[in-house]
Amino acid sequence: MNDSVVSTAEPTRPTQLPISLITSDGIAAAAEATAGFSMPSPDILLSLYRKMVLGRRFDVQVTALTRQGRLATYPSAVGQEACEIAAVEALAPQDWLFPTYRDTMALMTRGISPLESLKLFRGDWHMGFDPNVHRVAAQATPLATQALHAVGLATAARLKHDDVVALTFLGDGSTSEGDAHEAFNFAAVWQAPVVFVIQNNQYAISVPIAKQSHARTLADRAIGYGMPGYFVDGNDAAAMYAVISAAVENARAGNGPTMIEGLTYRVEAHTNSDDPSRYRDQSEEAAWRGLDPISRLDAYLVREGVLTDERRDEVAAEAEQLAATTREAMSEEPAIDPLELFEHVYVNERANLVEQREFLARELASTEPGSDP
Ligand SMILES: Cc1ncc(C[n+]2csc(CCOP(=O)(O)OP(=O)(O)O)c2C)c(N)n1
Ligand SMILES: [Mg+2]
């Protein structure tokens, strides 16, 4: 590609209504709702179904373990399985995923073990897995920083002619961050092979999307940056998979970034320390639970004769096994040395940190069993 040529092609504009392949009743959507995207094959749909069921069971289990005090905190992605799983399913092994704190389900789906993926939220260790093994970056808590990292890695890959696409998740609220703007802009300027998947779950903790953005959709912003934008039903795994796959292939072919907004809903609390009843109506939650992404795919696959009762039972049994493995992984108390906090921060020791470490060491020594309090 010639870097001095600025593309004058009109980037794809987001549709008025979210792109949908399967309606909320589990029926194939009408042609005008599909924006020309095709239904994925039955094998892919079955794989999406299985991974969504496993992902949800894992997430529900982790939330329960957090209530039991086994983890320090956990942001649930229940209700967002179509976005989480379709994104992972659309990536090739050599591609990179840049997740947020909400995307542990995606980490697990990409092959990271429960023990490793949960270390961070357990307060056990900064990051429990080697990012190079599964090509998954650290789960970012500072909002939108992961988008910059994705653009950086993708730009480097392009310069090195590596066949690598970077996909990053962002929340609706995170799109208000300066880092998100910088990532979108430079991804387009450098034509980086990046796919931005915005999970519009309609809340940034207690702030609803209406107080966050006055744009018709978040995907509309793509046009201003000069990249294609897609507004998709984020509870429709078939649609999310079709659109994300096309964006990944487009990036791989050297055609630059794409912004995809999946319209979904965070049915659970922001984290276990949040009480959503203080800022939203329970009937709203109930309505969105009725638009469940797994039941929708289940209904479609049954109607098409692809999902049998036997297969569903097998997947459910596999999910129970995963839940048991997850409980087992969290059953042992990790050996934590609080003084490790000070390691890996600076190459050269800093006087104030040395002082703080010595203070903590004295505190720990004075609280050891048998010491005089
Ligand atoms: C730079 C920064 N500012 C503020 C926060 C505090 N914070 C944590 S989560 C959150 C809401 C983010 O909402 P959204 O991007 O929609 O993601 P969601 O949690 O809904 O998945 C905020 C403000 C933070 N982590 N980082
Ligand atoms: Mg949100």
Image (cartoon, helix red, strand yellow):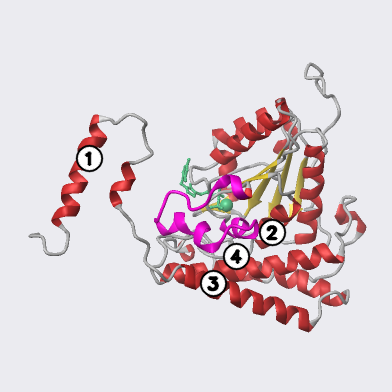
Query: Which of the two marks, 4 or 3, is nearer to us in this view?
Result: 3
Is the CB atom of the residue marked by disc 3 within 8 angstroms of ligand 1's nearest atom?
Answer: no
- Real-space Cα distance between discs 1 and 4? 40 Å
The answer to whether residue 339 is left or right of residue 193 is left
The quarter of the displayed image where residue 307 is located? bottom right
Amino acid type, callout 1:
Gln
Query: Which of the two marks, 1 or 3, is nearer to us in this view?
Result: 3
> Looking at the image, is 239 positioned above or below residue 246?
below
The residue located at (82%, 39%) in the rendering is 250
> Looking at the image, is 136 positioned above or below residue 58?
above
Q: Which residue is mark 2?
A: 85
Q: Which residue is mark 4?
A: 78
Q: Is the residue under label 3 in contact with that under label 1 (CB below 8 Å)?
A: no
Which segment is the magenta one? 104-133
The residue located at (79%, 49%) in the rendering is 245
Amino acid type, callout 2:
Ile
Give the camera-side residue of 105 and 280.
105
Is the CB atom of the residue marked by disc 1 within 8 angstroms of ligand 1's nearest atom?
Answer: no
**First of labels 4, 3 by sequence position:** 4
Which of the image's four quarters has the C terminus? bottom left
Q: Is the residue under label 2 in contact with that under label 4 (CB below 8 Å)?
A: no
- Real-space Cα distance between discs 2 and 3? 20 Å
- Residue 364, how many percent across, how many down? 19, 53
The answer to whether residue 222 is left or right of residue 10 is left
The quarter of the displayed image where residue 195 is located? top right
- Real-space Cα distance between discs 2 and 1? 43 Å
- Residue 183, how many percent across, how many down? 62, 33
